Structure formats: structure tokens, C-alpha cells
Amino acid sequence: MPELRTERLLLRAWRESDVEPWAALNADPEVREHFPDLLTRERSREAMTRYQADLDRRGWGWWAVEARATGEFVGVAGLGPVDEGTPVDGVQTGWRLARSAWGHGYATEAARAAVAFGFDTLHLPEIVAVTTAGNLRSRAVMRRLGMTHDPAHDFDDPAVPEGPLRRNVVYRLRADAWRTE
């Protein structure tokens, strides 16, 4: 399984030492503001185990993100098949960082490394990103990656109750647009 290195970050395999900071991140209401619920420690561990199994099986997926200068676990970023039941197909990029890692450009840096891997190594024709309509921080990262909003494919998530988290927006980036940046 490849590790992805940027100037300041390492996207790597998951470690047992990631469980506690990962669980804390998923229990933080501000980090989970655009998700329907907080995750328990057990659900966080299950997600981490699933992410590592995908990395082992495919060689890519949702990597743990570490700050290279300190070795601190700061979140997750990567690529994965779009969730079943989502009205768009393909591979999506995403990220979720601990609040302490916000405001440093880490989300863009980590996502850029994942997107480059998707296009340069996996030779994907397109990568999408999906978030709630109100997640302005993630939408800004999508724009910084060169992604464009595709309002024709925005959708209401039937698994989410009525309210501000139900509406999802779709952003797209084609490989040929990535190469011209």
C-alpha cells in the first residue's frame, strides 16, 4: 500500500495509536457538524478497520493523515467508491480533520495528494466530491482543487432526516482538467 507524502503531511496506513484521536475527532460536534450524528469509539474503530482493509485490498482508499513535523494524527483523507445509493457514480475524494488541524491548508494539501494519486496512478477519468450544501469549508477545498459544482446532480440524501443536512452538492474534476492546472 503506497503512502502519499506532501510537504507537510503523510497519508499512511492506520495504526492502533490512531484509535483514540480518531474517536475524539468523530465525537467532536464541530467536526461532525455536516454529518447526521457523532460516532462512538466503537463505530470509529469499525470505520478505521474498514478503511485499513480497503487500503490492504485495493492499495488505495481512506488514509490516516499525519503531520510530518510532529507525527501527530490529524485526520483522514483519500479516495473511495461513491457510496451505494448516491445518485452519482465513480470515485470520490474526501477528508475529515481534527479541529486543531483546521486553518492550516491541510485539507487541500491532503486532498490534492489523493486526487493526484487517483489521476496519475489509478488513471481515473474523473473524481467527484459530495458534501452537504451548507458545508462551505469543504466546498472551498473542492474549488481550490479545481473541481466544479455540478448542480444537475445535487440530491437530497434519503438516509438523512429533513433539514439542513439532507441537501447534498456534487463537485467534479476530470483528469484532462487536472492535467492542465
Image (tube, rainbow, N blue to C red):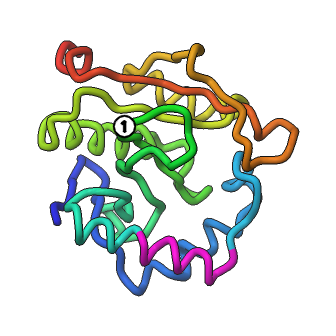
Left or right side of 11 for 129: right
For residue 163, what is the image quadrant?
top right
Q: Which residue is mark 1?
A: 90
Q: Position of residue 131 (x, y in %)?
A: 60, 37
Q: Which residues are magenta?
A: 40-50
Q: Residues within 10 Å of mark 1 (few under 14, many from 20)?
A: some
Q: Position of residue 47 (x, y in %)?
A: 51, 71
Q: Residue at x 23, y 23 (%)?
A: 175
Q: Residue at x 30, y 51 (%)?
A: 8
The total number of labels drawn is 1
Q: Residue at x 29, y 71 (%)?
A: 13
Q: Name the residue furthest bottom.
A: 16
Q: Nearer the viewer, residue 18 or 115?
A: 115
Residue 18 forms part of the magenta stretch: no
Q: Nearer the viewer, residue 71 or 17?
A: 17
Q: Residue at x 87, y 40 (%)?
A: 162
Left or right side of 120 for 165: right
Residue 41 forms part of the magenta stretch: yes
Q: As shown in the figure, which amino acid type bears the numbered disc 1?
A: Gly
Q: Nearer the viewer, residue 63 or 156?
A: 156
Q: Position of residue 140 (x, y in %)?
A: 54, 26
- Quadrant (top left/top right/bottom left/bottom right) for the C terminus: top left
Q: Secondary structure at mark 1?
A: loop
Question: Magenta segment, principal secondary structure?
Answer: helix
The correct choice, above or below, for 153 with respect to 128 in the image is above
The correct choice, above or below, for 48 with respect to 42 in the image is above
